Image (cartoon, rainbow, N blue to C red):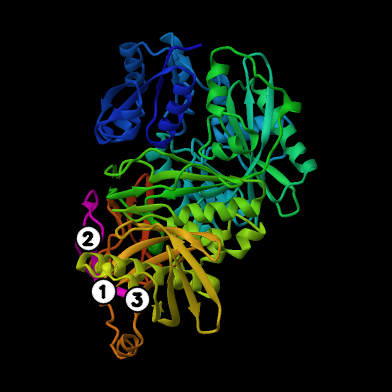
Amino acid sequence: MFEKILIANRGEIACRIIKTARRMGIKTVAVYSDADRDALHVAMADEAVHIGPAPAAQSYLLAEKIIEACKKTGAQAVHPGYGFLSERESFPRALEAAGIVFIGPNPGAIAAMGDKIESKKAASAANVSTVPGFLGVIESPEHAVTIADEIGYPVMIKASAGGGGKGMRIAHSSGEVAEGFARAKSEAASSFGDDRVFVEKFITDPRHIEIQVIGDKHGNVIYLGERECSIQRRNQKVIEEAPSPLLDEATRAKMGEQAVALAKAVNYDSAGTVEFVAGQDKSFYFLEMNTRLQVEHPVTEMITGLDLVELMIRVAAGEALPLGQADVTLNGWAVESRVYAEDPTRNFLPSIGRLTTYRPPEEGKFGGATVRNDTGVEEGGEIAIHYDPMIAKLVTWAPTRAEAIESQGEALDAFAIDGIRHNIPFLSALMAHPRWRSGNLSTGFIAEEFPEGFTAPEPKGEVALRMAAAAAAIDHKMNQRKRGISGQMRDPALLHFERERVVVLAGESYPVTVEAVGASLIVKAEDGRSWTVSSDWRPGEPVWQGEIAGTRVAMQVRGLLNGVALQHAGAAAQARVYTQREAALAALMPVKEDAGSGKQVLCPMPGLVKAILVKEGQEVKNGEPLAIVEAMKMENVLRAERDATIAKIAAKEGDSLAVDAVILEFA
């Protein structure tokens, strides 16, 4: 077994690998760029080596820097994580030439499967069901349009060396093919140094299901069940679960056997994932094979009880797999949410900055559920523009899917982040969504259910009542604090009281009676219903956690003038607690309206201006592209939201802009 390994990656996956290596008694070496000098993975590793400037092309993507770091520290092997160099055939070859072991598949398998065009050819030869498409390299937009016309719309334009949704576009017409071709090639070149793209048929109402495989150097390959990753945005996975609510045992076995056949055909000898697009009728077609550890591997670990990183390390060291196919059992259900630094209310545009608050939910077993949080950041850390915007992967396991979803929702409500925008409100709303809970999924789920984008809904029904009860409890705690400071708490009569209050939540009034009984409160509504509320929350804490009517509840708390902002189960609202007289007077106060900026196009996130697509004086129509801004490896096309004339262009190609910087103005 290795004594020391180097992790050629950063962020949460580097931290994840370090945890397993530490448990195995293996020392670790981290590498870092200028931007990651104070990163968590650097602090966790036994040693760390600086490898260059912040841009990945000048640091994490340079194989020679990684090899130099190995020689400097005596690392015997390299785990690539995912992304960066993980699927470059040249990297393990260079490591082998330097006498260093690659903790991943052999170069031949990467060459056969890592390239999406070649992998489809190999899958076809192995009798694996494949999606209709053109597998040759496409050189021009005109050629792409011709192919798409022959295949039939819609089509998917994909980067051959791509992954993580980069270099991928769906097109429903020849015009969209031409534009998507240009964007896919540009993103592919920027992210992977390879601008080749191909076109294939896009399956309508599809589901994304993948099979986890693992092989060793002795010819053994097994599959470890499936994951469903249908909840996606811009072809980037948002929610993953294992197993899939679509599959039955027979379909699972067919997919698994095809995945193993493909892996054996290329002598696969590490962890990898065979991805399929599935129809609602359980038909399935091969998409691609990822010759690396997947981002969503924790859900497989949770239902199998296996550590995939440990298996990868042991296989790379020459050990045989410790189990066969008959030994693989799937237990319970796991759900994973990807917590991203992005603003869901602004079309999920990236956000950067310092994490002034980072308080993830407590990990461990709680009743029948388990909570796990894989992260690469800590409070005070900075989210930089140079890398993927993932902050953490929140995973919950429970005996059933419904229980795993409930646990995930509660954990998200208890996840406090400040300093940047993030997608936790959106993830919480997803957990509460009836279609998600029913398992009626497709890769178009987000576009179909949130066609106008995401705005946190106002609370209704039981959610509103829980938030009103918590608001009353928070008000009581704040008043207790004030009385303690003033010395009034010496009055025994104040330890037990009953008071009438009006909770105003999202403009709705909830008259309640609040009775303090020992350490708990009894909150009674006008209709006679009552809830016992208990919590050890203290003023200033960003999360209120406790029990309401015997149910564990968590919600985000942010202080406001004369009130608090609450977020729970995907809903968000401002809450204020008044006496009846105060409530009557507050109802008479006018509501101030925000001023707009309708004549300006503002930069929606910090980013680099890749192109200005219009000129001053030009007339544009609703929907026409105006500019392209790149942030966190993704190109974002800004479009006109109405017919207008361009009066002034305030930015130029190559400018680095802050959020809300003016790009152009309309007449």
**Residue 661 - label:** 2
- Distance from disc 3 to disc 2, alpha carbons, whole Å, reads 34 Å
Question: Circle 2 sits in a helix, a strand or a loop, which is it?
Answer: loop
Residue 106 picture quarter: top right
Residue kind at label 3, given as amino acid type:
Arg
Question: Circle 1 sits in a helix, a strand or a loop, which is it?
Answer: loop
Which quadrant is the C terminus positioned in? bottom left
Residue 656 is one of the magenta-drawn residues: yes
Extreme residue in the right direction: 250
Question: First in sequence: mark 3 or mark 2?
Answer: 3
The residue segment tinted magenta is 642-667
User: What residue is drawn where x is 50% and y is 80%?
Assistant: 525
User: Looking at the picture, how far across and down is residue 449, in whole percent?
Assistant: 55, 65
Residue 255, placed above or below residue 309: below
User: What residue is drawn where x is 44% and y is 80%?
Assistant: 513
* Front position among marks 1 and 2: 2
Residue kind at label 1, given as amino acid type:
Lys
Residue 265, can we see it? yes
Residue 565, placed above or below residue 331: below
Residue that mark 1 sits on: 599
Residue 347 picture quarter: bottom left
- Distance from disc 1 to disc 3, alpha carbons, whole Å, reads 35 Å
Residue 152 picture quarter: bottom right
Q: Is residue 84 left or right of residue 312?
A: left
User: What residue is drawn where x is 42% and y is 26%?
Assistant: 18
